[in-house]
């Protein structure tokens, strides 16, 4: 299937997961600098299941507040607008894609565990490098591989072909995609992020997570998600070895090199946080 046919098919898919309207309302409100905390919490209150989920998130070990937060208005004040928006996005995305079919070579729980690990790692790297909006880096990390999910659900033959090539030739999924298909998962994922009207920095971070491009809306975020993905994959596959920095983009080495060289020191400690985020986001809906 050539890239034109594939993009056309992608555009025509009618049952692509939809996100709750509340997410778009929250996004719209946050674009207006005059939006008040009350207005934001009133909007979220329109969706009781979202309120319940956000309160659970705020009270989970993941955020680690000492006292219990039982009211969404307090949660908005405590966490701030951006963190609330990112919590709404994270909850919505995982929900939109839950209950999907599994294919051989594709385990949805494993997929989300990897995405959550990249999300938590991106956030931590952003904090370490003092990059703006670590919470947005979390969401970018959570979304980065979403194209794989679309591929596995709507282009099953292509997905299986890529997976078989990866197995046979001992390649990564992305390397096998380069051999087998014209539109690869970063492009598919960024298409979806655009369709969902996500901000440009998220669309770009998804698009460039395997091949860094300078001409993007937030280059630092692109480098962070790209670096976090390398670290998470490396530590899952061969943690006893060092990351080969000669294979990493020089700008990412300059920004993140010291953390990539020393994953044992800080990444080991981060694992508990990754576990707790997985526990929260992957728990069955009650
Ligand atoms: Fe990827
Ligand atoms: Fe990844």
Image (cartoon, rainbow, N blue to C red):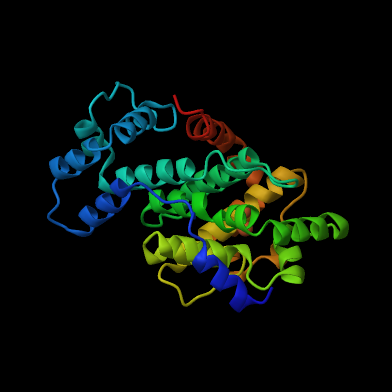
178 or 49: nearer the viewer: 49
Q: Quadrant of residue 226?
A: bottom right
Horizontal relation, residue 247 to residue 269: left or right: right
Q: Quadrant of the N terminus?
A: bottom right
Q: How many marks?
A: 0
Tell me which residue sits at (45%, 64%) in the image: 203
The vertical placement of 192 against 90, above or below, is below
Q: Position of residue 229 (x, y in %)?
A: 61, 54
Q: Is residue 86 left or right of residue 172?
A: left
Position of residue 270 relative to residue 121, above or below, is above
Report which quarter residue 49 is drawn in: top left
> Is 31 located above or below residue 97 in the figure?
below
**Quadrant in which residue 157 is drawn:** bottom right
Which residue sits at x=60%, y=64%? 253
Residue lying at 30% horizontally and 49% vertically, measured from the top left: 21
Which residue in the rendered view is the most extreme toward the right? 168
Indicate the quadrant containing the C terminus: top left, top right, bottom left or bottom right.
top left
Q: Residue at x 33, y 36 (%)?
A: 50
Residue 209 pos. (x, y %): 57, 63
Give the x, y percent position of residue 26.
26, 49
Residue 223 picture location, percent across and down: 53, 63
């Amino acid at each position: 299937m050539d890239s034109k046919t594939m993009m056309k098919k992608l555009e025509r898919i009618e049952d692509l997961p939809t996100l709750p309207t509340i997410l778009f309302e929250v996004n719209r409100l946050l674009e207006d600098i005059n939006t008040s905390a009350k207005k934001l919490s009133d909007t979220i209150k329109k969706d009781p299941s979202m309120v319940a989920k956000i309160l659970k998130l705020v009270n989970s070990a993941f955020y680690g507040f000492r006292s219990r937060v039982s009211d969404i208005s307090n949660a908005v004040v405590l966490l701030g607008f951006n963190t609330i928006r990112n919590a709404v996005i994270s909850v919505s995305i995982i929900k939109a894609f839950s209950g999907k079919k599994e294919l051989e070579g594709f385990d949805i729980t494993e997929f989300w565990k990897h995405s959550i690990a990249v999300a938590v790692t991106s956030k931590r790297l952003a904090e370490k490098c003092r990059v703006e909006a670590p919470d947005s880096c979390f969401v970018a990390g959570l979304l980065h591989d979403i194209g794989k999910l679309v591929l596995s659900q709507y282009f099953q033959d292509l997905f299986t072909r890529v997976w078989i090539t990866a197995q046979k030739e001992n390649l990564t999924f992305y390397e096998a995609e380069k051999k087998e298909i014209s539109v690869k998962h970063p492009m598919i994922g960024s298409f979806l992020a655009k369709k969902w009207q996500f901000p440009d920095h998220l669309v770009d971070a998804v698009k460039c997570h395997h091949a860094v491009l300078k001409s993007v809306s937030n280059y630092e975020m692109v480098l962070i998600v790209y670096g976090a993905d390398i670290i998470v994959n490396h530590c899952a596959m061969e943690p006893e070895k060092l990351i080969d920095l000669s294979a990493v983009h020089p700008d990412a080495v300059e920004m993140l090199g010291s953390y990539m060289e020393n994953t044992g020191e800080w990444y080991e400690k981060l694992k508990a946080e990754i576990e707790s985020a997985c526990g929260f986001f992957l728990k069955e809906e009650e």
